[in-house]
Image: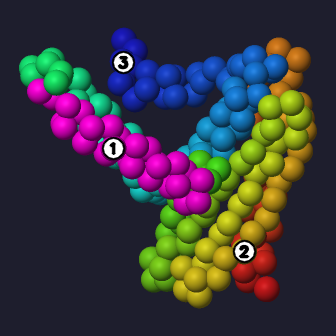
């Protein structure tokens, strides 16, 4: 009798990945698909550890604003206006300040960054290198721009490069992402940045 180990089914599931398919006319879907594929490339193929500090900060600020709004609604329900007047004023002011802080954070700190990852030294001696990626795809323009920043763990020197191509290059007529084509371009950028560091 033939016995199939659990690993057999796991490998089938992992290798039977369906290609990413999106609406080609939706610029947000195009950008998100390419951003996600970039994360996959660096996390799965090159073993980088993704850092979620930027996104966690945004999530915390959003959560605080939601809690303030919920508290104001609940307090007004328990102690109807005008008893809740001072509390509601306080909640509105706090909510406004948190929204301002969130806007400043997203504009000047997070910007268009969608990925921060750390690359460990193969020998385990040198500090980790930091990779930061941001992207743009204007609503009515076809060009996807991907910015790479590689910060050396030893020298703290940052080297940058830009990948700019028509998004149509990475999708077929059916809207399926051509990951092999896209990842080939990502590989060239990664090797170029590593070579620049060694020179």
Q: Which residue is mark 3?
A: 3
- Residue 63 visible here: no
Which region shows up in magenta?
83-109
Q: CA distance from mark 3 to mark 2?
A: 52 Å
Q: CA distance from mark 1 to mark 3?
A: 66 Å
Q: Which residue is mark 1?
A: 93
| Closer to the eye: label 2 or 1 | 1
Residue 57 is left or right of residue 129, and the answer is left
Residue 169 is left or right of residue 48, and the answer is right
Q: What is the basis of the colouring in this image?
A: rainbow
Q: Which residue is mark 2?
A: 159
Q: State which quadrant residue 163 falls in.
A: bottom right
Q: State which quadrant residue 170 falls in.
A: top right
Where is 49 relative to 182, above or below?
A: below
| Closer to the eye: label 3 or 2 | 2
Residue 20 is left or right of residue 195, and the answer is left
Where is 10 relative to 132, above or below?
A: above
Sequence-wise, which precedes: disc 3 or disc 2?
Answer: 3
Residue at position x 86%, y 50% from top?
164
Q: CA distance from mark 2 to mark 1?
A: 42 Å
Q: Pinpoint residue 146: horizontal percent, then vertical percent.
A: 76, 51
Q: Is residue 2 magenta?
A: no
Residue 9 is left or right of residue 39, and the answer is left
Residue at position x 20%, y 31% from top?
85
- Residue 10 visible here: yes
The secondary structure type at the circle numbered 1 is: helix
* Total number of numbered discs in the rendering: 3
Would you call the spot at circle 3 few (<14 residues within 10 Å), some (14-19), or many (20 or more)? Answer: few
Q: Main secondary structure of the magenta part?
A: helix
| Closer to the eye: label 1 or 3 | 1
> Which of the numbered marks, if any, corresponds to residue 42?
none
């Amino acid at each position: 009798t033939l016995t199939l180990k659990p690993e057999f089914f796991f490998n089938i599931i992992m290798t039977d990945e369906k290609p990413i398919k999106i609406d080609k006319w939706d610029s947000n879907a195009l950008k998100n698909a390419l951003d996600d594929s970039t994360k996959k490339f660096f996390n799965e193929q090159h073993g980088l550890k993704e850092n979620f500090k930027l996104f966690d900060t945004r999530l915390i600020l959003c959560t605080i604003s939601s809690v303030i709004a919920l508290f104001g609604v609940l307090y007004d329900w328990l102690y109807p206006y005008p008893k809740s007047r001072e509390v509601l004023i306080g909640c509105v002011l706090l909510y406004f300040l948190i929204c301002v802080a969130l806007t400043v954070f997203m504009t000047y700190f997070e910007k268009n960054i969608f990925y921060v990852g750390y690359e460990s030294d193969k020998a385990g001696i040198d500090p980790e290198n930091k990779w930061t990626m941001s992207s743009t795809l204007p609503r009515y323009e076809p060009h996807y721009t991907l910015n790479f920043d590689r910060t050396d763990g030893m020298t703290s020197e940052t080297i940058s490069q830009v990948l700019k191509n028509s998004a149509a290059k990475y999708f077929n007529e059916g809207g399926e992402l051509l990951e092999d084509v896209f990842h080939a371009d990502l590989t060239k950028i990664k090797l170029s940045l590593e070579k620049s560091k060694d020179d």
